[in-house]
Image: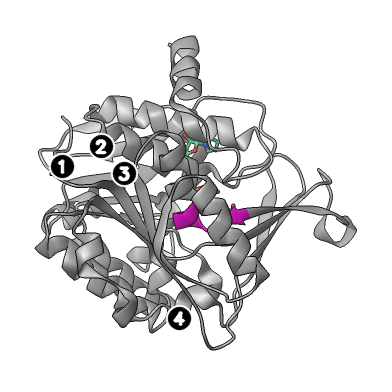
Amino acid sequence: MSLTFNQDKEFDIIAIGRAAIDLNANEYNRPMEETMTFTKYVGGSPANIAIGSSKLGLKAGFIGKLSKDQHGNFIKQYMEEKEIDTSNMVYDTEGHKAGLTFTEILSPEECSILMYRDQVADLYLDSTEVNEDYIKKAKILLVSGTALAQSPSREAVLLAIQYAKKNDVKVIFELDHRPYTWKSAEETAVYYSLVAELSDVVIGTRDEYDVMENLDSEGDNEKTVQHLFQHNTELVVIKHGVDGSYAYEPDGTVHKGEAYKTKVLKTFGAGDSYASAFLYALVTGKDYETALKFGSASASIVVSKHSSSEAMPTVEEIEQLIRERS
Ligand SMILES: Nc1ncnc2c1ncn2[C@@H]1O[C@H](COP(=O)(O)OP(=O)(O)OP(=O)(O)O)[C@@H](O)[C@H]1O
Ligand SMILES: O=C(O)C[C@@H](O)[C@H](O)C(=O)CO
């Protein structure tokens, strides 16, 4: 099976949420305390997904709020260079700053991220800054879970979803759980469930679905999908890291995508590169099996490189990897 999109739309994908900055450690296999230099990239899960999609040839736009300073300018310029429409990216006028993410590469298997996200500009996106005429031009509205963590960004995203549903735009929810921005597990579960139930496609790791269900131990994929299929959802993707990922359809069909083993440099960036290539495959009419291969291949390429955004692969690189491993 494949997903059907309204073809009469100017944009393939419009993402909403944070566009921020990654500072990735230049020194490998070292704790943060001993890491002295970093390379700057544009980051933030939905921004990474928009960048990855654009690199694959999709027409992408972005809705978000930037700090009104050199960091905000850097993010906007970079996204424009990557041919993303930034007409609906606004600058904050109240002094809020860009989110910063420092990455620590302790070993290829043990990476962590330190996020500086107190009072960040992206969470101050306001409902009045979300434009229905813009959203209705898209095949996909890509929503990131972190944008639901606080008001006014939460209401802005909920309004964007309402506009999407009114205008035949598919809502794709990337759970993208970043615990630092949330007040409590209960609050997270409430908003995650609410938006997942409204979405056409939900993508997340097993851990993130556990957060959505407010579970203390690992949940059961079958129970998760049965619940979502009672609502609007047409497709549920559950990722299990290097053990691969599953796409579930409402009629009970389950597709498994194997991860493509590679020489891993760092593990972050896997989820965003996976989502951009998975969505590229869906939008270009490929079936779910192929979409899973695209997601896995894209992630495999990005985990072998230094950044998340700049390392996003081309269609040719993804297809070559899939061919080599078939
Ligand atoms: N070590 C790895 N080697 C190759 N592929 C990987 C590896 N880790 C993850 N992947 C691929 O990336 C996909 C997404 O990974 P994962 O489930 O870890 O997402 P995530 O937690 O959202 O990622 P992130 O760390 O970016 O937040 C997996 O389904 C798999 O195909
Ligand atoms: O999502 C973020 O804000 C950080 C990302 O940009 C970072 O590259 C990462 O962790 C991706 O998984």
Q: Secondary structure at mark 1?
A: loop
Relative to 108, is 195 above or below? Answer: below
The answer to whether residue 11 is visible is yes
Does 62 appear in magenta? no
Instruction: Say which of 312 and 194 sits in front.
Output: 312
Front one among 193 and 55: 55
Residue shown at the point (32%, 54%) measured from the top left: 14
Earlier residue among tags 3 and 2: 3
**Residue beneath label 1, please?**
5
Q: Position of residue 186 (x, y in %)?
A: 37, 78
Instruction: Say which element carries label 2.
Output: helix
Front: mark 3 or 4: 4
Q: Which residue is mark 2?
A: 283
> What residue does disc 4 label?
124
Q: Quadrant of residue 283?
A: top left
Which amino acid does the dot numbered 3 rest on? Val
- C-alpha span from label 3 to label 4: 29 Å
Q: Is residue 326 left or right of residue 301?
A: left
Q: How many marks?
A: 4
Q: Mark 2 to mark 4: distance in Å?
A: 30 Å
Q: Nearer the viewer, mark 3 or mark 2?
A: 2
- Inspect the image, locate mark 2, and give the three-letter code of the amino acid beneath it: Val
Circles 3 and 4: CB atoms closer than 8 Å: no
Helix, strand or loop at mark 4: helix
